[in-house]
Amino acid sequence: MGKLPQKTGIPIFGNGLEIGRLENQELEPWFRREADKVLNNGGHMMCVQVMSKYLAIPLDGEGIKPILDSTVEITKSDDYEFVLPWIGKGLLTADGEKWKTRRRMLTPTFHFKMLDGYVEVFDRLSRKLCQVLEKSDGKVIDLFPIVKNCALDIICESAMGVSVNALENKEDPYVAALIDMGFLVMQWSMNPLNWFPPYWLLSGHRKRFNENVKYLTDFTKKVISDRQREFEKGNRKFLGNKVTFLDFLLEAKEANNLTDEDIREEVDTFMFEGHDTTSSGIAWILWCLAHHQDVQENLLDEINSVFQDGNSTNLTHEMIKETPLLDQIIKESARIFPPVPIVQREIQNDFQSGEFILPKGCVVWINPMIIHRNRKVWGDDFMQFKPERFAPENEKPRHPYDLIPFSAGLRNCIGQRFALLEEKVMVMHLIKNYKLFPTEVGFHENELREEIVTKPHRGLKLRIEKRKEIIRDFE
């Protein structure tokens, strides 16, 4: 690992003490500064040492291609072991043959036909979100927790077919446990002191973690048990006219030799991965639109062309496809503010990556923020919000892995179509019904806060103003 470009650290501790002193929102600038030094010298990968961990960090599409294209090096790092008591060896954490088998089995759940059923849920709950916001018309509010609660309602109904009504019942214990788990996972991941069991115990975090795990897994087990009884009676509960994620697993149980625990692992994995990422993505899209009024108004015109008969139209999968500007906005927002800050792989065999050999046992940090904010790829204006970067004529010259909000390759995010559709539907309803205005915090003053997902450090505080009904004649 010493052959990779790296910042000189302290023996044993490496760069760990320096990184450990940083505030959460200071992490991204630190890594980007070090990455720029390497990029300016023509490099594509750097190394950071944190205690006994050696992290190989690819800096651009060329640097990350070998690991993403590998069909062998697909094992997640041991950092993911922290969440095993909760999500077990589901699709996120599984490796080897189990991962391949589960991936093949679950891929059809995100097929276009299945997604049609989910769109109905996205549409209905996004409308409810707009109704909830009516009481805040003309006010400055933090939209992030409200968007997050809507995403929780969506994922609970889509994954399990149950409603926790997080939009109106913010004190729901399942919602509280899920949010607290996100906090604890990040506390453990980013603070090396928590890796020592006595410290983790004395801090009280272990007790909270165990209580949350018990509540979340008991909740899922009960939902599975109740739904299984209905299946045995011949009563199939459907999501609209489509099955939920849990229904699919129960239907596949016998053919795939799934146990109840296998099903619970995948449902809890869907819950873990599926609500925070989409709420983060939506939050950053809204932040970008509020600070770029011209783009927001152009998007409104595109949205109104889809809702040709007003708000009464129920969005469909086909209608959502007719929004090329929204596609560009989502990509550019995810470029500047990627929802997932880090994905980790642990090298199982000495691995050739460009000019370097990554030794067995080292960890590859796939860091979308570094890759997405590479000035050599995106230009000196890389921090400016410019959706036209993703117009068809502008995308061709770039490496396909220079934008990886959902990772890429063999272990890309299986739920990315689900996430993108949810983001599109919620943003379409919000922008059609409300005009968003920035407040006193500037566009880049709201630093990225790295938790399980990236969050606005100062919240998503925007002024919202209900739009007057505008009737346009679309030819």
Image: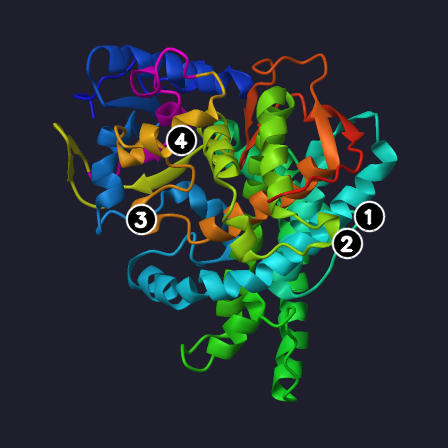
| Magenta residue check for 376 | yes
Q: Residue type at mark 4?
A: Phe
Which residue is found at the position 22% from the left and 30% from the top? 62
Gap in angstroms between the C-alphas marked 3 and 4? 32 Å
384 or 230: nearer the eye? 384
Identify the residue position indicated by label 3 in the image.
75
Residue identified by numbered label 2 = 165
**Quadrant the N terminus occupies:** top left
List the residue tagged with mark 1.
168
Left or right: 187 in relation to 166: left
Residue 293 location, x and y as percent?
63, 21
Earlier along the polypeptide chain: callout 4 or callout 2? 2
Please tell me whether mark 2 sits on a helix, a strand or a loop.
loop
Residues marked 3 and 4 touching at CB (< 8 Å): no
Mark 4–mark 2 CB contact (< 8 Å): no
CB under 8 Å between callouts 4 and 1? no
Query: Which percent across, then down, holds residue 91?
Result: 42, 57
Q: Position of residue 225 (x, y in %)?
A: 64, 75
Amino acid type shown at disc 3: Thr
The alpha-carbon separation of the residues under discs 4 and 2 comes to 36 Å
Q: Is residue 38 visible?
A: yes
The answer to whether the residue labelled 1 contacts the one labelled 3, judged by CB atoms less than 8 Å apart, is no
Tell me the residue at 63%/12% (across/down). Answer: 442
Which residue type does callout 1 highlight?
Glu
Alpha carbon separation for disc pair 1 and 3: 40 Å
Q: Residues within 10 Å of mark 2 (few under 14, many from 20)?
A: some
Is tag 1's residue or tag 3's residue first in the polypeptide sequence? 3
Mark 4 or mark 2, whichever is nearer to me: 4
Q: Position of residue 11 (x, y in %)?
A: 31, 16
Which one is closest to the eye, mark 1 or mark 3? 1
State the residue in front, 107 or 176.
107
Tell me the residue that label 4 is attached to. Answer: 390
